[in-house]
Image: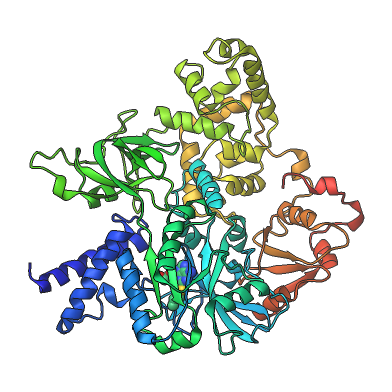
Amino acid sequence: MSETERITELRELLHRYNNLYYVQNAPVISDIEFDQLMHELIDLEEKHPELYDANSPTQRVGSDISKGFEQAEHRYPMLSLDNTYSEQEVREFFQRISGLLNEPFEICCELKYDGLSISLIYEDGKLVQAVTRGDGVKGDIVTDNVRTIKSVPLVLQKGNYPREFEIRGEVLMPWTSFEKLNAEREQQEEPLFANPRNAASGTLKLQNPQEVSRRQLDSYLYYLLGEQLPFDGHYENMMEAAKWGFKVSDHMKKCTTIEEVLDYISYWDTERKNLPVATDGIVLKVNSLRQQRNLGFKAKSPRWAIAYKFQAERQLTRLNSVSYQVGRTGAVTPVANLDPVQLSGTIVKRATLHNADIIKGLDLHIGDMVYVEKGGEIIPKITAVDMDSRSILMGDPVRFADVCPECGTKLIRYEGEAAYYCPNSISCPPQIKGRIEHFVSRKAMNIDGLGTETIDLFYQAGLIKDIADLYTLKAMDICRLEGLGEKSAVSIVHGIEDSKKVPFERVLFAIGIRFVGETVAKILARAFKSMEALENATMEQLTAVNEIGTKIAQSIVSFFADERSRELVNRLKEFGLQMELTEDQTQGGTELLSGKTIVISGVFNHHSRDEYKALIERHGGKNAGSISAKTSFVLAGDNMGPAKREKAQELGIKLVSETEFLEMINEKITTITSNELLLPF
Ligand code: IVH
């Protein structure tokens, strides 16, 4: 192949990989391989300037701009760093700097945090704007979301900071938050985030700062920019920034010899595994800002810095077979069964293949030697096939299953979705068991003692075939099963009996209608008040409820159109489950605030903030954490924060006083007690 042909091939490949990574969130090769291909293309393009193409993958830095956010231009473009995976290139960098400067210099070594970069602007010691990297020139304004990150100071500690400056760093999701988030998503059968970086970036782009706050992002700052910085040294400036309140890494180190630099690299190559956040390398920076200015910049990166990237941990192993797992909603996930290999301290036998498109993209055949990677990820994945070790006698190509591996029903694929589904929701065993697991879960009926294994045991023994059968269970039948004593049998039966008191909106969530999550169940319960009313609701009546769109409405209508679902609900009713709101819940409830999104701010005289939240919900409104164009009004108490007041003014949003609000919902101040207000909604 000529060099010209190779350039064309590499451009096509890299465009495809870029799309899989950035758009589809489903990379098929490792970062190292991607970087290698990119470097090969950069080298070839340098050799052939006549083949310049403004649309070559080398001509852009990946953009993270998304719809729905306003954008701002960066005062100084956000550049990237040259990457290397080799010690030799680190030595060459050191020698190059030494030659160019021709005077003593220090190198500041620091960790390369694996999140997404952020630019923060401070004026008079206050955070005024946070912008993502975007395309390097302009990015999304995500100030409201960044304000929820506890380690980002909103107001600086006293100190000699410049009146106006910019500080850049990385927004990260710590491992613990990431694992918690994915566990929740797994329970809800939502797609998992592949790594903390994707989770952090998905979170920062949410339009709901309350949810951002709940997911607990963190930050590390590593680059101070401005006209009047306190010191000439980058390290010294960062230590100063730490005093102003920024989270700066404790692990920065100034080195003067290449040996010290290489020692730092090898120490952190293993030690980084003990850090609470993901890192993917080491950044080396010339410490003096004067020397940085002398060295200057190339087109997309500074000459005074380089990133050494750690090898992602990966292993070559044999693909023995592909099996398929069926979840509660019937979604079918392909899983690769592998020859066991040791990877990042654990033995890996299985890896996810995500969906049919990924299998196709990898061109997988049974018996292939495949690369399994963990890197920043929790769930190992197959990133590539080792084509060289494929013999002529290669195995059968992996084709996605046509029928459900559990019940033999033909699989279907909904338009616009990557997953295949088994449509036999009523009698496909893992779907039944999954629905029972969901039904008993904490946020649904909250029945203790019924884990996956116990449910499987009951199902295998023919004791339960659907959720209603739980209410026919007798302690005597249970304690006959292996591993279940009399004590646990009695406690399970008690738990089941107690669940009959669980309020209607949770029963509605528990029965597992597709797209009816916890919040939607609450909204529906409030709007229709009983299962019967919901059962008879038309598409028009359903979509007339604020926040219920056609997708949810359609799902409810088709659930109740199925005679088997109606029968199931009837049986639950006969067993005594709550099928309507109690008098307590309906009493005093109105739709006076229906469709209104209300922000609560300040302190109040008559009720606590929680009580006001309950009141808003009881009268059909929605409480939101931060002011946006969607806010209907702010319920403003005393000492409302100046930032919120300013924001409301800027967006022309009305402030409603405590008395005005109570009048609005016809509440007499003296007749309300706290207990009444703190009903489930
Ligand atoms: S310095 C002009 N320091 O790596 C260079 N970057 O590939 C400014 N990163 O976009 C960046 N840790 O998101 C710097 N300690 C660190 C870093 C770091 C992570 C990220 C950053 C940047 C990318 C460059």
Answer whether residue 65 is visible to the viewer in this image.
no
| Quadrant location, the N terminus | bottom left
Q: How many marks?
A: 0
Image position of 271 with respect to 234: above or below: above
Is 302 or 92 nearer to us in this picture? 92
Is 167 or 665 nearer to us in this picture? 167
Percent x, y of residue 209 = 60, 63
Percent x, y of residue 477 = 57, 11
**Colour approach in the figure:** rainbow
Kindly identify the residue that appears in the image at 50 percent across and 83 percent down. Answer: 288
Q: Quadrant of residue 595?
A: bottom right
Kindly identify the residue that appears in the image at 37 percent across and 80 percent down. Answer: 97
| Ligand 1 image position (quadrant) | bottom left
Q: Is residue 26 left or right of residue 613?
A: left
Q: Is residue 149 left or right of residue 311?
A: right
Kindly identify the residue that appears in the image at 66 percent across and 69 percent down. Answer: 627
Q: Is residue 221 left or right of residue 268?
A: right
Q: Quadrant of residue 324?
A: top left
Kindly identify the residue that appears in the image at 56 percent across and 33 percent down. Answer: 439
Percent x, y of residue 435 = 50, 33
Which residue is at the far right?
670
Answer whether residue 570 is visible to the viewer in this image.
yes
Is 58 or 586 nearer to us in this picture? 58
Image position of 303 with respect to 570: above or below: below
Q: Quadrant of residue 221?
A: bottom right
Percent x, y of residue 343 = 37, 43
